[in-house]
Amino acid sequence: MASVLFYILGFTLLAATLLSITRRNPVHAVIYLVAGFFALALMFYLLGAPLVAAWEVIVYAGAIMVLFLFIIMMLGLTPQESLSGPGWQRALPLALLSASILCCTLLLIQQDPVAMAVDQAYYLGPRAFGEALFGRYALAVQVVSFQLLFAAVGACYLGRKSSREEPS
């Protein structure tokens, strides 16, 4: 059962990512990317890493995607694709992705692979994760935080109105 769920989640992740990079509307692309991050979080949980799954949802699907949406709205990017066809055809991919993620979540709640894990040697608790992240990998964490800071400053710089521009 776990391998079937893994392949379903893998296909869902692949479909969401492909839909994300092929959409011309940046808001739709971000929403598909969030669906992909939820599928990836469920895959981490299925593999016995609930803490990594929680971090995936909190950091990537939460904070980073809100930052992306904030930058998209701040830069005023307009949708490039025209809305054509009935409304159900436009919403069908997201509905299918959401339904597959919901079904897999319900099946994982019934199965709970972390509680059934026989070998607890590979289980990494929050304390050990924090010690590794801020002990051994402290420099990498600081480099990534500076990259995110530079990206936010760059977005603010690109999004501000120049004093040389004349009002229209």
Image (spheres, rainbow, N blue to C red):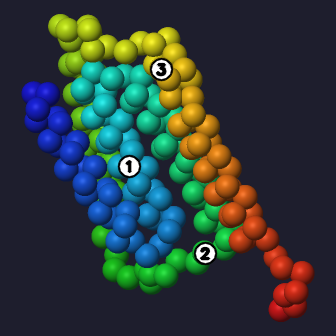
Q: Indicate which disc, 1 or 2, sits on the residue closer to the N terminus.
A: 1
Residue 32: percent from left, percent from top: 39, 57
Res. 124 in view? yes
Reading the image, the residue beneath label 3 is 132
Q: Residue at x 82, y 76 (%)?
A: 161
Tell me the SS state at disc 2.
Answer: loop
Q: Amino acid at mark 3?
A: Ala
Tell me the SS state at disc 3.
Answer: helix
Q: Nearer the viewer, residue 9 or 103?
A: 9
The answer to whether residue 139 is above or below residue 35 is: above
Q: Residue at x 23, y 18 (%)?
A: 113
Residue 94: percent from left, percent from top: 34, 57
Q: Quadrant of residue 24?
A: bottom left
Q: Quadrant of the C terminus?
A: bottom right
Q: Residue at x 24, y 49 (%)?
A: 12
Res. 92 in view? no
Label 2 crowding class (10 Å Cα cut-off): few <14, some 14-19, many 20+? Answer: few
Reading the image, the residue beneath label 2 is 77
Q: What numbered label is drawn on residue 35?
A: 1
Q: Nearer the viewer, residue 33 or 96?
A: 33
Q: What numbered label is drawn on residue 97?
A: none
Q: Residue at x 36, y 35 (%)?
A: 41
Q: CA distance from mark 1 to mark 2?
A: 21 Å
Q: Horizontal placement of 50 versus 64: left or right?
A: left
Disc 2 vs disc 3: which is toward the camera?
Answer: 3
Q: Horizontal placement of 17 versus 155: left or right?
A: left
